[in-house]
C-alpha cells in the first residue's frame, strides 16, 4: 500500500459513513475507457461506474454539452416549464412506445415512481383497491425502503425492517408461480429483463412474453426495470425490445446522463393518467443541467449506433469466451448476458481471479463471489476487450486453487 493510497483510505475511515466495501483503488482521473489511480497506475475500465459512463469518462462531446448548459441554466425546480426537459422527453420517447416521461435522480427513485404510479392508477383510474407489486427472486430495484421491499433480499434489509407492505417475490421463469401469486389486490408486476445485480441473469423471452400476456389477461400492469440494462446496453435500445414486449411503464437511470445523477420513468398515456398535479414530485429531478447533458448522451447513442455496436461486440465476446470455456475445462461454468452486459460465472475462486485482473490493470465487478460482471462503455475499443479476454485466459490457464 503506497503512502498516497494509505492517506486516502485513512481519510475515508475518518470522515465517511462505513456503508461501502471499497475496491483497493483510489481513482483520480478518467478518460474514455481508462482510469488512473492516485499512484499513476492505469486501468482498463470494464465496469463504467456500474453501467453509468456508457460513453466513457470525460467524453469530449458530453463535456461540451455540460459546459454550454452550465452557462445557460442549472436549476429552477419543477415549478417552472423548462425546454431542456421537453427536448429530452421527445428524444427518449421516440425510442419506445411510451408517451409520457417523469424525471428524477436515480434508479431507485425511478422504480419508486413506477410503484406509486401503479398503485395510484389502479385506485384513481381503474377504481380498484389494488396495491400489491410482484417482483422476482434475484431481482434488485434499489435501496430506498419501497424499492428495498420490492427487491426482497434479507441481506439488504437487515436492520431496516419493517419494510413497507404490499410486495411479494416469486421465482423467476415460473409462470405458474406468478399466476398463483396474482390476486385482485395485485397492481403490477415489475421485472428486469436481465437481472444485473443478480449476476447478469437474462430471463427467458418466452417466459417474459407469456408473463406480459398473463398480466393483460388478469388486468395487472406489466412494468420493466431498465435501470441497468437500458439505453443500448443489451443490443437493443431498451432490453424489453429484445423480446417484443410492450410494458406499461419502465424505469431508467444509470447511463442516462453519463455520470450525472439522472433517472426517468416512461409510461403510456393510459397509465400516466394515474399521476396528476401534486401526486408525485421531486425537487432536483430533470433539472436543466442534467436534462441538457442527458439529451446529448442519447443523441450520441443514436448517432453512433452504439446499440448495434454493443450487440456486435457482445456476440464477439460470448463467442470468444465459449471457445475459452472449451479450452479450459473446469474453469468457467457459464457465460451469460446480452450485448455488453455480460457475466462470466467461474468454477474457481472468483475473488482470486478478480484480484489478479485488478493487479493486471482490468476493472470489473465480482457478483456473489463467483461471477465476473462486465459493463464496459459502449464505445470501448475492441482491442481493450480482446486484451481483457487474453489476460483472463492466461489467469485461468495458470490458476491453481
Image: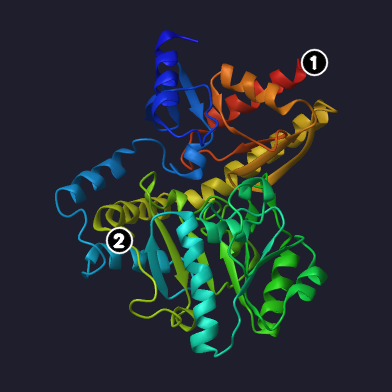
| Disc 1 target residue | 400
Q: Residue 196, can we see it? A: no
Q: Are marks 1 and 2 in contact (CB under 8 Å)?
A: no
Left or right: residue 293 versus residue 23 is: left
Q: Residue 283 carries which label?
A: 2
Q: Residue 162, can we see it? A: yes
Q: Where is residue 111 in the image (x, y as percent from the top left)?
A: 51, 62
- Residue at image position (62%, 47%) is 156
Left or right: residue 283 versus residue 16 is: left
Left or right: residue 374 versus residue 322 is: left
Q: Which of 382 and 111 is in front in this view?
A: 111
Query: Whole-Å distance between the Cαs marked 1 and 2?
Result: 53 Å
Outermost left residue: 71
Front tag of 1 and 2: 2
Q: In the rendered view, how is the structure colored?
A: rainbow
Left or right: residue 167 versus residue 86 is: right
For numbered disc 2, what is the local secondary structure?
loop
Image quadrant occupied by the C terminus: top right
Q: Which of marks 1 and 2 is nearer the N terminus?
A: 2
- Residue at image position (57%, 72%) is 247
Q: Residue 285 carries which label?
A: none
Image height of 239 relative to 233, above or below: below
Image height of 161 relative to 346, above or below: below
Image height of 250 relative to 140, above or below: below
Crowd band around label 2 with a 10 angstrom C-alpha radius: few (<14), some (14–19), many (20+): few
Outermost right residue: 329
Q: Which of 131 and 52 is in front in this view?
A: 131
Q: Where is residue 5 in the image (x, y as percent from the top left)?
A: 43, 15
- Residue at image position (54%, 90%) is 127
For numbered disc 1, what is the local secondary structure?
loop
- Residue at image position (24%, 43%) is 64
Image quadrant where residue 205 sits: bottom right
Amino acid at each position: 500500500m503506497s503512502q498516497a493510497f494509505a492517506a486516502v483510505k485513512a481519510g475515508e475511515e475518518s470522515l465517511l459513513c462505513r456503508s461501502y466495501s471499497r475496491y483497493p483503488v483510489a481513482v483520480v482521473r478518467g478518460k474514455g475507457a481508462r482510469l488512473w489511480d492516485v499512484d499513476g497506475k492505469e486501468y482498463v475500465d470494464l465496469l463504467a461506474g456500474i453501467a453509468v459512463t456508457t460513453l466513457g469518462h470525460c467524453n469530449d462531446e458530453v463535456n461540451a454539452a455540460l459546459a454550454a448548459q452550465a452557462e445557460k441554466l442549472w436549476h429552477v425546480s419543477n415549478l417552472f416549464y423548462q425546454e431542456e426537459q421537453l427536448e429530452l422527453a421527445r428524444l427518449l420517447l421516440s425510442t419506445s412506445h411510451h408517451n409520457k416521461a417523469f424525471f428524477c435522480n436515480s434508479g431507485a427513485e425511478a422504480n419508486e415512481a413506477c410503484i406509486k404510479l401503479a398503485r395510484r392508477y389502479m385506485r384513481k383510474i381503474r377504481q380498484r383497491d389494488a396495491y400489491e407489486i410482484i417482483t422476482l427472486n434475484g431481482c434488485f430495484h434499489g435501496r430506498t425502503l419501497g424499492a428495498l421491499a420490492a427487491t426482497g433480499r434479507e441481506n439488504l434489509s437487515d436492520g431496516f425492517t419493517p419494510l413497507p407492505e404490499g410486495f411479494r417475490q416469486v421465482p423467476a421463469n415460473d409462470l405458474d408461480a406468478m399466476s398463483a401469486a396474482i390476486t385482485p389486490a395485485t397492481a403490477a408486476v415489475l421485472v428486469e429483463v436481465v437481472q444485473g445485480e443478480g449476476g447478469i441473469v437474462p430471463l427467458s423471452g418466452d417466459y417474459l412474453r407469456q408473463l406480459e400476456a398473463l398480466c393483460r389477461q388478469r388486468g395487472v400492469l406489466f412494468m420493466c426495470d431498465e435501470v441497468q440494462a437500458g439505453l443500448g446496453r443489451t443490443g437493443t435500445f431498451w432490453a424489453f425490445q429484445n423480446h417484443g414486449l410492450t410494458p406499461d411503464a419502465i424505469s431508467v437511470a444509470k447511463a442516462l446522463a453519463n455520470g450525472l445523477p439522472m433517472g426517468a420513468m416512461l409510461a403510456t398515456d393510459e397509465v400516466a393518467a394515474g399521476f396528476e398535479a401534486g401526486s408525485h414530485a421531486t425537487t432536483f429531478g430533470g433539472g436543466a443541467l442534467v436534462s441538457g447533458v442527458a439529451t446529448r448522451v442519447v443523441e450520441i447513442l443514436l448517432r453512433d449506433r452504439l446499440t448495434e455496436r454493443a450487440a456486435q461486440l457482445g456476440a464477439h465476446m460470448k463467442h470468444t469466451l465459449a471457445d475459452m470455456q472449451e479450452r479450459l475445462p473446469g474453469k468457467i461454468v457459464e457465460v451469460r448476458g446480452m450485448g455488453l452486459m455480460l457475466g462470466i460465472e467461474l468454477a474457481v475462486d472468483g475473488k482470486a481471479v478478480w484480484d489478479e485482473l485488478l493487479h493486471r490493470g482490468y476493472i470489473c465487478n465480482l457478483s456473489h463471489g463467483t461471477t465476473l460482471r462486465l459493463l464496459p462503455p459502449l464505445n470501448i475499443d475492441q482491442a481493450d476487450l480482446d486484451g481483457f479476454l487474453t489476460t483472463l485466459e492466461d489467469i485461468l490457464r495458470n490458476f491453481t486453487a
